[in-house]
Image (cartoon, coloured by chain):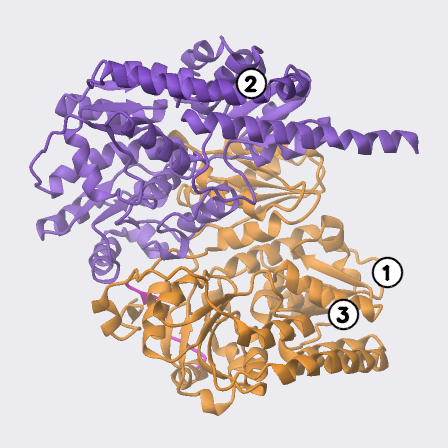
Amino acid sequence: MRGGIRKSRNGCVLHGALYTLGSLQGVVPIVHSTAGCVLQAYEAQKYGGPDDGLISGFEVPNTNVQERHVIFGGASRLREQIKNTLRVQNADLYVVLNSCESAMVGDDTDAMTKEVVEQGEPVINSVLAGFHGDVHRGYENAMENLFKKIPTVFSDRLQKSERNVNILGILPQQDIFYKGDLYEIKEILSLFGIRALTFFGEDGGLEELKEAAGAALTISFSAWGNKAAHYLKDEYGIPVVERAALPLGAEDTFSLMEEVAKYIPIDNSLLEEVKDKKIKKEQDLLSRIEKSLYELDVDRSIVIVADESTAVRLSAFIKRIFAVNVSSVIVTDFYASEDNKSEDAIRRLSGYADEILLSNDDKAIRDLIRSSGARIILGSSLERAVADEINAALLEISFPVADRLFLDKTYAGFRGAFTFIEDLVHTIRLFDRQEDERLKELQV
Amino acid sequence: MPKRSDPEVQMSIYSEKKSVTREKRTGSINSFDDSLSTLKDILLGSNVKQRIRTYSQGSCDEITLALSVLLSIRDAVTVIHGAIGCAASSGAYAGEGAVWYCTQLNESDTILGGDEKLRQTVLRAYEENHPQAVFIVSTPVVSINNDDVNSVILELEDEINIPVVSVYTDGFKSKIAANGYDITSHCLLKHIIPEDIKDGDDSLNIVSFSESRADLISILGLLRKLDIKFRLIPRFSSVNDIRDASRAKASVVLNRDDGEYLAEGLFEKFGVPYLRTPSPVGIGDTKRFLRKIGEAFGKSDQVEELIKSEESRLNELKVKSSLSNKSFYLDLPLGYIPGAVETIESIGGKVSGIAVPSVDPKSCVELDRLPSSLNGIPAFAGYGQPFEKANILSKINADYYIARDCDPAFASAYGSIPIPIGHSSILGFDGVRTLYKAAGRNGIAIAGKEKYKPGWLKRSSNWYVKMEEK
C-alpha cells in the first residue's frame, strides 16, 4: 500500500536491537543517537510489550546528540560516552548502536569501538540504523552481530558440547510470550537430556552467548533467526534446523523432536515413553472438554493478525484440533523486502488459511477483516477497534498487547496447547455473553 | 486589551513563522547539579551559561512530547514523517479513536528525499478520516535531509481544505524537550485558531500539556463544583476546542513551564487574559489557584465555600498523617515543587532534594518561594538521568522519592521508597491527600538492583555536568 502506514505497530531496527540487548543479562547497549529514540522504544514496550526488559528507557546510555554533532560530527561525543559508560554502568558486555542520525552524518562507530577494545574493554558495536528496516530486522541483526563480534573481544577457547542446542527466532518483547515460549522449549528439550541455550533466561547473557559456538545444533523458530543460525553454521559447522514456527500441541512437538533426533542422539524408547505420556494427557484433557469444544462452534470465521511464525503455529493448531481452516491470515512481518513479498509465507500458510495478506497497514487489515465476515480475531490490541465495529471476539496474541504483562505464559509446546484452548474458549464465551446485551437492545 | 493591529503585537514572537528554541527564548538549561543556592545564583544573571552532560542516559525529546499532545487531540490525524521507529510510541500516547500515519522513510529516502511519500500519506490521512486537521511531525531524518515539508503542504492546498500543519520538530536543535510544547503551541496559535474571533463565551481555558488524567480529574472536578464553564487545551481536547480558545474569558496554566507560551500567545494574538497562578499543588497553592479564578468569574463566595468544605475534609486525614521528620526527594515539574514543599513541611516532613526537567532565569518565580532552609539541598536539572540521581540519593537522607515523569523504581536500591504519582493525583485537594498518605507507603518486595558501579557513587554527582564549550 502506498502512502505510509496507518497505525503502525512495529518499531525500527534500533528498537529491535534495544529489545534484544536489553533483555540479556549483563548486556548494556550504548546508543549513539538524538534524544528520543530510546524513549520511543520504551513507550512502545511499556504500552504493548510483555515486560520492561532488564535495561530500558531512562536507564539506557545515550549520547543525546545535538545540532553541533549533526553538523560537525559526533564521534568525539561517542568516544567520551563509551569511556564514561564503562565507568558508570555495570555490564559484562557493552554494545554500541547506531541511529538514523549517526548513520546519515557518518560517525565512525567502528573506530570509536575499536579504540576501547584495544584498551581491553568488553565493547562491540552494531552498524545498522533505524531506517534500515523494522524491529524484526533489528533482532535478526543484533543476534548475528553478537555471535560475530563476541569472539573478537573475548578469547575464550571454543568448548564443544554434544547436547547443547541454540534457540533462535523468538524475539524478546516483540514476541509477547517470548519468556514463556523459551521456558517451554527449554523444558521440552530437557526431557531428553538436551540443554537449550535460550540466551534470554535468568542464567543467560554473555556466557551463554559464548557457548553458542560450541553447540551441537541450532533451531531457528522463525525466519528472523535464520541469519544468525546460518552464520553459526558457516563459521562453526553447527547444523541448522529451520522451523516455520514453534510447535504447539503434542503431535507438533514430537514432529520437532523427530527432526532434532536426526542431529542429536535421543534414546528411542525414551522418546516413545514421553510421547505416549504427553499424547495420553492431551487426549484425556481434550476428551473432557469435547462437548464444550463442539458447542463453541469454532467454525465461525477466524482471522489471525500476527507475525508469520505465530500465524503458522496457531492456524495449523486450529486445523488439527477443530478441523477448520482459518478464513484469513494477515502477516505483519515481511521477511522479504517490501517490493518482493514472500511467496514462501503464502505457501506455508495456504494449507491452513483460505486467504493470506501481507500487510501491517491498519486500513488494509481492517478492510480484510470486515470483508472476511470474521467472528473471532486473533490479533493485537490495535484490532480492538475493528473487533468492536463488526461485533467480533478478540484474543490478543501479537504485539502490541495493551494493559498486560507476560512472565511465563506460552502458547507453545505441550502446556501452550492447554493455555491457548483455555483462553480461546474464554474469549469466545465472553463474547457470546454479549448477545444478552444485544438482545436487550433489540427489545427496547 | 491589545488589538491585532497594535505594533507590539505585530512584532511579537507569535507572528514569526517559527518559535525560537527554549535556549534562545528563555535561556533554559537541562544540565545542572549543585546546591539550590548555587542554582539560584547562576540564574540571577540573564545570560545563563549552557551546560551539557558528557555522560547521559535516554531522555525525552521535543518529538515525543509533541506527539504526546497531538495524538490526544480528537478529530485530528497526525502524520509522523520519518523512519518507522519515530512512530513507535504512538500507541502509548494515542487517545481513544486516535489515528496516526508514518511515512516510514527508509535508507533510499534518506538520500533521495521523502516528499512524495509525505504527499501520499497526507492525502491518505485526509481521505480515509476526513479529520478537522492534519499535523505533520518531522524527525531527524527529515531535518538532516532538509526535506521541504512546507512545499508539500502548498501543493496539497487545492486537494485538501482543512489545515495541514507542519509541526517543525527535528529532535536535535534544542536540548529542552519542552521545546516540543512550544512548537505545538506556536502551530496551534498560527494554524488552528482562526484570525476572526467569535463572540466570547464566558469560558475558562485550562492549559495542560503533561498533567496526568488523575490530576485533570481532580482539577476539573473542582471547577464543575463551581459551575464554571471550562475548556481543556491542548491535550485531551479537540480541534474545535482549540479553535474556540480565543473566545474564552481567561486562561489558566497548570504548569507554567509547559503552558506559559500558549497562554501568553492567546493573550497577545487574541486578547484572552492570562491569569497567572501557581500550580495547584498543596492546600495553599490550590487555594490561590481557585481564588484567582473565582475573582475573574465572579464566584469568590462559592470558591470560599468549596475551600472550606474541602479543607475540613482534609483536616481529619492531616491529623493522622504525621511525617515525623521523614525526608523526601522531589522529582517533579518545577511548578509543583513549592506547593509540594509546603504540604510536606506542614505535616512534619522534610525535603532533602529536588529534580526538575529544566531551569532558566524565570525559574526564580518558583525557586524564590522555597524556604531558605532548603538552600543547601541538592538541586538537579535534566530529563531522567537516574545514574546521577542514584549518586545524589546515595549521599543524602531521602526516605521517599516522589517522581511523576521518570521511573522512580531505581531509588529503592539507594535507600529511598519510590512513590510514583502517574495515577494518583498531585494536584488539588486530591493531590494533598496523596501527599498526606505518603507517610504510610512501603516499598515492594523486590530489592532494587544496584545498576551503577561503586566507583561512580564515590564521585561527585555532577562529575559529568560541564560547561558547554562554544
For chain A, the rendered hue is purple
Residue at the image position 46 percent from the left and 62 percent from the top: B444
The dot on residue B199 is 1
Q: Reply yes or no: does residue B458 show up in magenta.
A: no
- Name the N-terminal-most of marks 1 and 3: 1
Question: Tag 3, which secondary structure?
Answer: helix
Q: Secondary structure at mark 2?
A: helix
**Could you say which is closer to the camera, residue A78 or residue B399?**
B399
Quadrant assignment for the N terminus of chain A? top right
Instruction: Find residue B267 and report its image quarter.
Output: bottom right
Please give the residue where the numbered disc 2 appears in the rendered image: A287
Q: Which residue is mark 3?
A: B222
Taking depth in this image into account, of B147 and B138 the one nearest to the observer is B138
Q: Residue furthest bottom?
A: B373
Magenta span: B45-54
* Residue sitting at x 20%, y 50%: A92
Q: Height in image: A168 above or below B444?
A: above
Check chain identity for marks 2 and 3: say if they share one.
no
- Which residue of the protein is positioned furthest toward the right in this rendering? A444
Marks 2 and 1 sit apart, C-alpha to C-alpha, by 72 Å
